[in-house]
């Protein structure tokens, strides 16, 4: 029925631990907001979602809590996730009288059946007619424009907020994948722990993220940098300002970065030799927000002796890939898993 196309607003969602991005068929990416919800503890009412809620992180009075409903790439708080999804869907699907949208949602490749069901249920309760799940590394590969249906292998590393996905893709399938729950959030935690342990300075999540983005690195920089950090002195109990350098932050991140490097090594060890030679020619493609950590590509290049390429606009690769599947469902049907009610 050709008219069906006019009456639905199909959407693709990259439901991330740190950010949620939404792609509407025929329009492209229309929403990119932090995955944060502010809730009034007394009445359980949602006060703010997205950017407005992120502003409140670490600053809320006792009766308001700013929640990140996703942890390690999967739904940790079902009710809040549902409210967040419903809000984002409502913002992008303008016409209420249309049919409910079909939704493609990207999920970590290491997700369990129970976690898949949670994603599907929350999307259906939030107003989806049909839900398709797409593995994040596959979505990233499609978003970058890799020929996923070819027999030649491609390796993708998607470093998100909650998970790092490392996958070798060929013939519309994931040949081998390593999904570790170490990514951007762990890098932030490492900075918090380092400053607490070594300098008795307590900082919040948002400050840690800011430090990581401004002066964080995984490899010595040509020009080392520094910045002022404000936090609380744990000994005196008063606010305190301190100068930290990119060298100190690199030391703070070292262990977490090494875990990611090790996971890449393991993934390469498990790759069939024929596909390994393809990766030698093509290199490894990095996507996700974590790919923006300075020097991570250099560090991987040094450790693996393979070419490592950071994708253009790595933050949107996954949602662009999911969007591409949405625009051409028949072509990409093999990579989508239709989730039905059991």
Image (tube, helix red, strand yellow):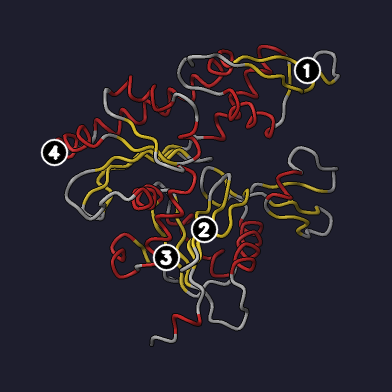
Task: Identify the secondary structure beneath mark 1.
Answer: strand
What is the crowding at mark 2: few (fewer than 14 residues within 10 Å), some, or many (at least 20)? some
Q: Name the residue located 73 percent from the left edge and 18 percent from the top edge.
A: 201
Distance, label 3 to label 2, CA atoms, is 18 Å
- Residue denoted by label 2: 29
- Residue denoted by label 3: 132
Distance, label 4 to label 2, CA atoms, is 36 Å
Looking at the picture, how far across and down is residue 321, in whole percent? 39, 55
| Pointer 1 or 2: first along the chain | 2
Judge depth for marks 1 and 3 and give the one in front. 1
Judge depth for marks 1 and 2 and give the one in front. 2
Figure quadrant of the C terminus: bottom left
Task: Identify the secondary structure beneath mark 4.
Answer: helix
Q: Name the residue located 50 percent from the left edge and 78 percent from the top edge.
A: 8
What is the crowding at mark 1: few (fewer than 14 residues within 10 Å), some, or many (at least 20)? few
Kindly tell me whether residue 118 is visible in this rendering.
no
Kindly tell me whether residue 317 is visible in this rendering.
yes
Closest to the observer: 47 or 229?
A: 229
Distance, label 1 to label 4, CA atoms, is 54 Å
Q: In this view, does 265 lie above or below 96?
A: above
What is the crowding at mark 4: few (fewer than 14 residues within 10 Å), some, or many (at least 20)? few
Give the number of the disc on residue 241: 1
Looking at the picture, how far across and down is residue 91, in whole percent? 64, 66
Task: Identify the secondary structure beneath mark 3.
Answer: strand
Q: Name the residue located 47 percent from the left edge and 15 percent from the top edge.
A: 220
| Pointer 3 or 2: first along the chain | 2
- Residue denoted by label 4: 274
| Pointer 4 or 2: first along the chain | 2
Distance, label 1 to label 2, CA atoms, is 39 Å
Specify whether 296 is left or right of 328. right
């Amino acid at each position: 029925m050709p008219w069906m196309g006019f009456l639905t607003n199909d959407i693709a969602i990259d439901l991330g631990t740190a950010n949620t991005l939404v792609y509407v068929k025929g329009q492209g990416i229309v929403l990119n907001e932090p995955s944060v919800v502010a809730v009034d503890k007394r009445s359980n009412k949602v006060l703010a979602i997205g950017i407005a809620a992120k502003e409140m992180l670490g600053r809320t009075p006792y009766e308001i809590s700013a929640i990140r409903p996703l942890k390690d790439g999967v739904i940790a708080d079902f009710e809040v996730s549902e409210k967040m999804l419903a809000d984002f869907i409502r913002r992008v699907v303008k016409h209420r009288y249309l049919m409910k949208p079909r939704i493609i949602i990207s999920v970590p490749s290491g997700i369990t059946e129970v976690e898949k069901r949670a994603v599907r249920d929350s999307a259906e309760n939030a107003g989806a007619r049909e839900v398709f799940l797409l593995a994040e590394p596959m979505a990233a590969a499609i978003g970058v424009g890799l020929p996923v249906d070819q027999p030649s292998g491609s390796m993708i590393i998607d470093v998100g907020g909650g998970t790092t996905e490392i996958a070798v893709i060929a013939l519309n399938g994931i040949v081998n994948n390593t999904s570790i729950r170490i990514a951007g959030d762990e890098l932030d935690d490492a900075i918090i722990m380092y400053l607490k342990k070594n300098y008795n300075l307590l900082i919040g999540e948002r400050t840690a993220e800011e430090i990581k983005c401004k002066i964080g690195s995984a490899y010595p920089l040509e020009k080392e940098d520094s910045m002022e950090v404000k936090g609380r002195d744990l000994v005196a109990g008063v606010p305190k300002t301190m100068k930290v350098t990119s060298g100190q932050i690199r030391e703070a991140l070292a262990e977490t970065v090494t875990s990611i490097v090790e996971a890449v090594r393991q993934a390469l060890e498990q790759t069939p030799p024929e596909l390994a030679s393809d990766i030698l020619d093509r290199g490894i493609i990095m996507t996700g927000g974590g790919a923006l950590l300075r020097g991570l590509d250099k560090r991987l290049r040094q450790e693996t002796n393979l070419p490592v390429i950071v994708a253009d606009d790595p933050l949107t690769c996954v949602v662009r890939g999911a969007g591409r599947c949405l625009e051409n469902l028949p072509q990409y049907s093999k990579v989508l898993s239709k989730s039905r009610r059991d």
